[in-house]
Image (cartoon, rainbow, N blue to C red):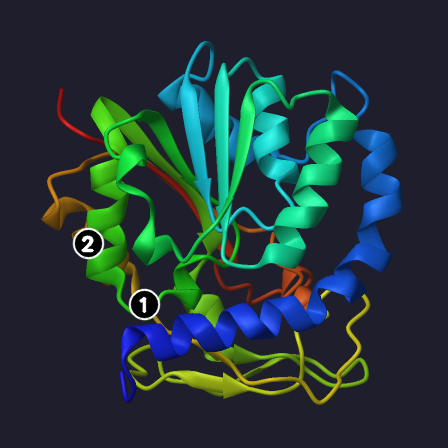
């Protein structure tokens, strides 16, 4: 890192705040209708499989970087008894509050505006499952500290469940105006990306935005990070379909790279 951790997390919070209205326009009206259905789920089968390994029924779940909490609402529909969503962006937490209310889950869900590195102490040791979904690892400037936060939140015997972009995918640069995505970056890149083209990955409209900073974390960094804080690997699966709205054309190419992965790690009882 060329700056301290908080420089990056503060900058990224401002970038997400800036794009929140665009995401709201693209998604919120539809989601407000969909979450009213008791069978609603935004989760794909690979993540459902990972959550089933951890077990959802009667569990307490926290999702870090929850965005609008549609994934956490989906987990609650699977039988969890308590859900806590954390995001640094007040604007996305506001969208999440609307969705939770529409789903009728206010009594069993809590939403918190917080930097994930600065969570309230009252959350420590409270959760059966810590969940992160697409893109979260890439926003983390300090992966070892992030894993220490995760370990601190878990009860003994609890599980860390992940579905995220595969780090190999981050070697590619999306094509412009329908052009093919191309290999441009080293898998061993150490300095952060600085992006000012905005985070509108639904409408794919570039705009001059506040700078966002993302980071390459190799697969060994991700695996060893969990093992390094005492978590045990229970499940790992690579994904060949688009889960990220990033370089979507790669889903169709013959020489397809891994596009994502799902993983379950367990804290010793």
Q: Earlier in the sequence, mark 2 or mark 1?
A: 1
Q: Quadrant of the N terminus?
A: bottom left
Q: Nearer the viewer, residue 180 or 189?
A: 189
In the shown orientation, is residue 37 left or right of residue 12?
A: right
Residue 108 against residue 19 in the figure, above or below: above
Task: Check contact, mark 2 vs mark 1: CB within 8 A.
Answer: yes
Q: Nearer the viewer, residue 138 or 91?
A: 91
x and y, in percent, of residue 54 in the image: 37, 22
Q: Quadrant of residue 132?
A: top left
Residue 15 against residue 82 in the figure, above or below: below
Residue at the farthest top position? 58
Q: Secondary structure at mark 2?
A: helix
Which residue is found at the position 83% from the left and 36% from the top?
32
Which residue is found at the position 45% from the left and 26% from the top?
51
Q: Which residue is mark 2?
A: 225
x and y, in percent, of residue 235 in the image: 32, 33
Q: Which residue is mark 1?
A: 217
Cα separation, mark 2 vs mark 1, equals 10 Å
Visible residue check, residue 265: no
x and y, in percent, of residue 70 in the image: 66, 38
Q: Quadrant of the C terminus?
A: top left
In the shown orientation, is residue 69 left or right of residue 223?
A: right
x and y, in percent, of residue 31 in the image: 81, 39
């Amino acid at each position: 890192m060329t700056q301290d951790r908080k420089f990056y997390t503060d900058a990224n919070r401002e970038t997400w705040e800036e794009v929140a209205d665009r995401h709201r326009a693209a998604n919120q009206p539809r989601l407000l209708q969909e979450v009213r259905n008791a069978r609603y789920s935004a989760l794909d089968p690979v993540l459902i499989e990972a959550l089933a390994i951890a077990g959802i029924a009667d569990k307490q779940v926290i999702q870090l970087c929850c965005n609008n909490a549609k994934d956490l609402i989906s987990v609650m529909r699977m039988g969890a008894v308590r859900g806590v969503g954390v995001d640094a962006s007040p604007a996305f937490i506001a969208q999440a509050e609307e969705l939770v209310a529409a789903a009728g889950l206010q009594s069993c869900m809590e939403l918190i505006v917080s930097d994930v590195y600065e969570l309230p102490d009252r959350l420590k040791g409270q959760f059966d499952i810590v969940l992160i979904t697409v893109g979260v690892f890439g926003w983390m400037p300090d992966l070892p500290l992030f894993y220490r936060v995760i370990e601190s939140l878990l009860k003994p015997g609890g599980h860390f469940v992940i579905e995220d972009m595969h780090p190999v995918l981050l070697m590619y640069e999306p094509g412009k105006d329908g052009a093919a995505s191309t290999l441009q970056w080293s898998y061993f890149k150490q300095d952060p990306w600085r992006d000012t083209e905005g985070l509108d990955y639904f409408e794919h409209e570039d705009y001059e935005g506040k700078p966002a900073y993302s980071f390459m974390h190799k697969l060994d960094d991700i695996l060893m990070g969990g093992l390094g804080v005492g978590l045990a690997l229970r499940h790992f699966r690579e994904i060949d379909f688009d889960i990220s709205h990033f370089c979507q054309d790669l889903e169709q190419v013959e020489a397809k790279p891994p596009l994502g992965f799902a993983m379950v790690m367990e804290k010793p009882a």
